[in-house]
Image (cartoon, rainbow, N blue to C red):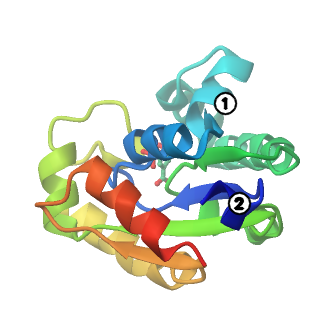
Amino acid sequence: MQQLLQGVNVFLIGMMGTGKTTVGQKLAQRLNYRFFDSDVLIERVTQQRISDIFATQGEETFRELESQVLSELASCTKSVIATGGGIILKPINWSYLHHGLIVWLDAPVPILTKRLKKDKTRPLLQQTDLSLKLQSLLEERRYLYAQCDLQIIIDEYQTPDDIVEQILELVP
Ligand code: S3P
């Protein structure tokens, strides 16, 4: 598998709650790759939580930071990178993502709603109708996620290990 990928990075994209971090860590282990999470790196660089960046500096500043972090990650090799759900929004980010294999974890809204219903950390989801918000975000973004190299459709019975196996089977 490692030979097939030949050190090429794997970028996991997809909505909040699709399991990019958990799946990414496991995939990195299987491939003997390093693992990075763009949100964690942003928090490390700024010494602030994502929710505080959104609250004090706004979403646009967060998106700029996200692009900067991604541009640096793009120059790595042998890495699995879990990206924030909105990474696909800035056109410039696609030039960085195309440095690797782009894998979309695509889970339906009911699964995301179930997983995120107690979440307090994601600034875009702090409103009353979680399911509606996720639905509208997914509708806005679906055509962007669809520009991936590999789409993995997730159902409620798959474990993170199952998803890793599915990715490995489908790597071109
Ligand atoms: C966001 C997703 C979050 C984080 C931020 C914005 C989004 O990351 O980057 O809250 O716009 O979808 P996860 O997808 O890792 O939750």
Q: Amino acid at mark 2?
A: Gln
Residue 123: quadrant of the picture: top left
What residue do we see at 76% from left, 72% from top?
A: 91
Say above or below: 156 vs 74.
below
What residue do we see at 54% from left, 57% from top?
A: 12
Position of residue 160 in the picture relative to residue 92 (left or right): left
* Label 1, ligand 1: CB separation under 8 Å: yes
Quarter of the figure that contains the N terminus: bottom right
Residue identifier under label 2: 3
Say above or below: 122 vs 98.
above
Q: Amino acid at mark 1?
A: Ile
Say above or below: 105 vs 54.
below
* Label 2, ligand 1: CB separation under 8 Å: no
Residue identifier under label 1: 42
Q: Position of residue 172 (x, y in %)?
A: 61, 79
Q: Earlier in the sequence, mark 1 or mark 2?
A: 2
Foreground: disc 1 or disc 2: 2
Q: Pick whichever, 37 or 84, lies toward us.
A: 37
Q: Position of residue 164 (x, y in %)?
A: 39, 55
Q: Is residue 109 visible?
A: yes
